[in-house]
Image (spheres, grey):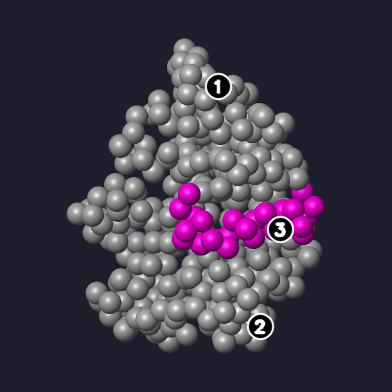
Amino acid sequence: MIYQGKQKIWADYQKEIPDDHWFYVRSCIRQNFFPGAERMFLEICRNVLGKDFYEAANHTTCGGIAYHCDTIPQETVMTIVARQFALMTEAGYENYVASCITSFGNYIEILETWHEFPELETRIRELLWKACRREFKKPKYIAHASDLIYKYRNEIAEKAKFRLVDRQTGEPLKVVEHIGCHYSKMFPSKGVGGAEYPYVLCGMIESWGGSVIDYPERRHCCGYGFRQYHVKANRGYSLSNTHKKFESMEPYHPDMIITNCPGCPYFLDRWQYVIAEMEGKTYGRNGYGIPVFTYEEVAGLVLGYDPWDLGLQLHQVAVEPLLDKIGIEYSPEDKYKGLNKKDILRPELPGVLKCC
């Protein structure tokens, strides 16, 4: 009976994810933080797996950061999102996939609000028509981009050139998975595994040969928190949350961290430098930090793409020790070369956190 009950609970948090034909919307901040991630997502979906993914050049930010920072009202965000739905409708798609966790949460919140308050949806349709003479159909299905890589994880594993395994020992790498708060904490039924047992990243890690670390602060926020960071006086709250997570995971000696949110990899990566400068402490081996990756970057690595084409040189924490551990070849000389192998500026290295 207990087993059957657990099976029922787990079944409630499974998602039937369509296999193909998606309207893809990018993230405003991911393109700046980790610009190779979204390009790799489309590369894998379109060219490696042969799927139909369409994106419109004239789509805009969803307004999520401004909304969560209390600088614009919800009706404004709804009208922005309604325009994005109109672009999807005009392109002939009904499956909508978002690169950004916050956008994903916004879309779900808006659709749920319209369901409860249909008169508000009517008003937004009127505002959209007045603003740009557009109409829309609501998406038949909304997914986060990590849902798609999760769905395709076994296909990727079949084509993989590398696995998340120590090439010297044959042991699985120890991987921390960090789920963005807006993925399933807002509406648990919309995420694979819900809020307590999200499996979207665990499934990738296990399919690609790694071992998932369970640690006390596994579900703790990375610390971004919008107003915690965007209000400069509040940034200590952001840093303290990240510090709490690293202190909690440190005894388990993780090899890497994989995330599915725009802000999480940025702060988990950059705050390691800040903690090192403030406290003289690092969390990786031999003075290095723990490298932090997006799920697209990890998918690209196992498929054999050049780490620098993935944009891994933009990470604060050095990725080279992990690449060596897996056995992924790379050219140190090409790390800071741009298009056509042109040399670009090399960053100044930190004083405490060891880098390559």
Q: Amino acid type of disc 2?
A: Glu
What label sits on residue 257 in the rendered view? none
Q: Crowding near pointer 1: few (<14 within 10 Å), some, many (20+)? A: few
Q: Crowding near pointer 2: few (<14 within 10 Å), some, many (20+)? A: few
**Dot 3 and dot 2 residues touching (CB under 8 Å):** no
- The spot of residue 25 in percent (x, y) is 58, 43
What label sits on residue 329 in the rendered view? 2
Q: Is residue 126 above or below residue 196?
A: above
105, 47: nearer the viewer: 47
Quick one: SS at disc 2? loop
> Is residue 54 something that shows in the picture?
yes
Q: Amino acid type of disc 1?
A: Arg
Q: Earlier in the sequence, mark 3 or mark 1?
A: 3
- The spot of residue 77 in percent (x, y) is 43, 32
- 9 left or right of 316 in image: right
Tell me which segment is drawn in magenta: 28-51
The image quadrant of residue 57 is top right
Q: Marks 3/2: CA distance?
A: 20 Å
**Placement of the N terminus among the 4 image quadrants:** top right
Q: Amino acid type of disc 3?
A: Ile
Q: Marks 2/1: CA distance?
A: 52 Å
Q: Earlier in the sequence, mark 2 or mark 1?
A: 1
Residue at 55 percent across and 21 percent down: it is 133
- The spot of residue 68 in percent (x, y) is 35, 40
* Residue of label 3: 44
- 168 left or right of 197 in image: right
- The spot of residue 278 in percent (x, y) is 24, 74
Secondary structure that dominates the magenta span: helix
135, 320: nearer the viewer: 135
* Residue of label 1: 133
